[in-house]
């Protein structure tokens, strides 16, 4: 994804106490948006691309620190703020089995905690579960220094909570939601008000993409003719990923913002589904 800078002319840097700041970071880039809470309108969207740099989770702190140093808007005071960390390194645990003091052991059962990382967890009220994940300790401290009250979460948490916020009591049958990131994609399947599946898969090309999706359809006995796939994230209409999905699955569509989300006209130059996870962070508090 290329660099993006969309700023509404109504932005007033002296009124950020009336704004919400949402940030999303992955190995491929740093994105943030600003919402005017009085007008309920998104007025800034920026994406700083890292894809040409060889960024690792260990070196990601330097890139984020550079963004904070270069972007004046990141250093203002906001009424509220959220940060979403995009990584595959997380595990869901039912609330009945969760113990904060045992989070490290639960995480280490299936994942490896690096020396530069610390454990964090999000409570997902929609499924009464905790998402346990790791985050670079220096990144965590940087965020808390710049925005002491910032809510830090994992992308799977915001993805799942967003789906239930938008679709609870509205689905008549199973729906398959796919959130695509450049290195991996998340899949959540909802039936009525239950989460049937959440998983994440690495991909290098569209063949990887369709292989894992059709595997899920086969294992859960989903119907490619009737069950709907709803897309969001870094996937474009008529791309190889989109076209191969339409070849095997009849009902495919892109997710849209909810009716209560208002955007600056400057946002018309991008497909709205790409940054939906970012736009919905302020709903998942």
Image (spheres, rainbow, N blue to C red):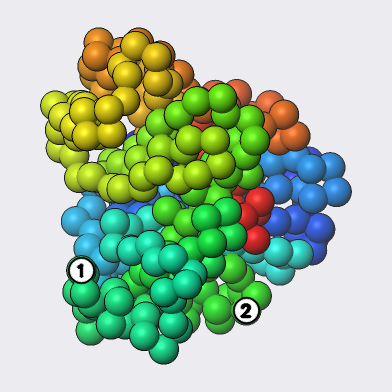
Which quarter of the figure has residue 86? bottom left
* Disc sitting over residue 10 in the figure: none
Query: Which comes sooner in the sequence, label 1 or label 2?
Result: 1
x 41%, y 89%: residue: 101
The quadrant of the picture occupied by the C terminus is: bottom right
Which quarter of the figure has residue 170? top right
x 56%, y 41%: residue: 193
- Report whether 216 appears left or right of 250: left
Q: Secondary structure at mark 1?
A: helix
x 66%, y 51%: residue: 283
Q: Is residue 54 above or below residue 95?
A: above
- Report whether 225 appears left or right of 98: left
Label 1 sits on residue: 110
| Image x and y of residue 186, in percent | 34, 44
- Report whether 91 appears left or right of 285: left
| Image x and y of residue 74, in percent | 59, 62
Looking at the picture, tell me which residue is in the foreground, 133 or 270: 133
Looking at the picture, tell me which residue is in the foreground, 107 or 74: 107
The quadrant of the picture occupied by the N terminus is: top left
Q: Residue furthest bottom?
A: 101
x 54%, y 35%: residue: 192
User: Spatial distance from mark 1 to mark 2, Cα to Cα?
Assistant: 31 Å
Which quarter of the figure has residue 217? top left
Q: Is residue 73 above or below residue 6?
A: below
Label 2 sits on residue: 148
Given this view, does label 1 or label 2 mark the residue nearer the observer? 1
| Image x and y of residue 116, in percent | 27, 81
Q: Is residue 76 above or below residue 283?
A: below
| Image x and y of residue 11, in percent | 75, 46
How packed mark 2 is, by other alpha carbons closer than 10 Å (few <14, some 14-19, many 20 or more), is: few
Q: Is residue 273 visible?
A: yes
Q: Is residue 66 above or below residue 127?
A: below
């Amino acid at each position: 994804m290329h660099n993006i800078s969309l700023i509404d002319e109504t932005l007033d840097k002296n009124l950020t106490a009336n704004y919400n700041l949402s940030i999303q970071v992955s190995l491929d880039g740093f994105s943030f948006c600003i919402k005017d809470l009085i007008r309920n309108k998104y007025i800034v969207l920026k994406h700083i691309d890292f894809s040409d740099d060889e960024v690792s989770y260990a070196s990601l702190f330097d890139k984020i620190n550079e963004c904070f140093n270069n972007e004046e808007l990141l250093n203002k005071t906001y009424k509220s703020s959220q940060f979403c960390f995009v990584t595959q390194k997380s595990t869901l645990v039912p609330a009945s089995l969760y113990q904060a003091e045992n989070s490290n052991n639960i995480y280490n059962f299936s994942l490896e905690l690096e020396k530069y990382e610390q454990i964090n967890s999000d409570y997902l009220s929609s499924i009464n579960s905790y998402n346990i994940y790791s985050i670079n300790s220096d990144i965590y401290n940087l965020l808390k220094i710049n925005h002491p009250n910032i809510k830090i979460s994992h992308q799977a948490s915001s993805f799942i909570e967003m789906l239930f916020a938008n679709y609870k009591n509205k689905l008549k049958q199973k729906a398959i939601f796919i959130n695509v990131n450049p290195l991996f994609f998340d899949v959540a399947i909802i039936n009525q008000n239950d989460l049937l599946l959440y998983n994440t898969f690495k991909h290098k090309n569209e063949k990887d993409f369709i292989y894992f999706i059709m595997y899920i359809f086969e294992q859960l006995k989903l119907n490619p003719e009737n069950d709907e796939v709803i897309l969001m994230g870094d996937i474009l209409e008529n791309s190889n990923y989109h076209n191969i999905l339409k070849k095997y699955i009849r009902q495919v569509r892109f997710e849209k913002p909810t009716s209560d989300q208002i955007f600056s006209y400057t946002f018309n130059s991008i497909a709205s589904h790409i940054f939906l996870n970012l736009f919905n962070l302020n709903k998942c508090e």
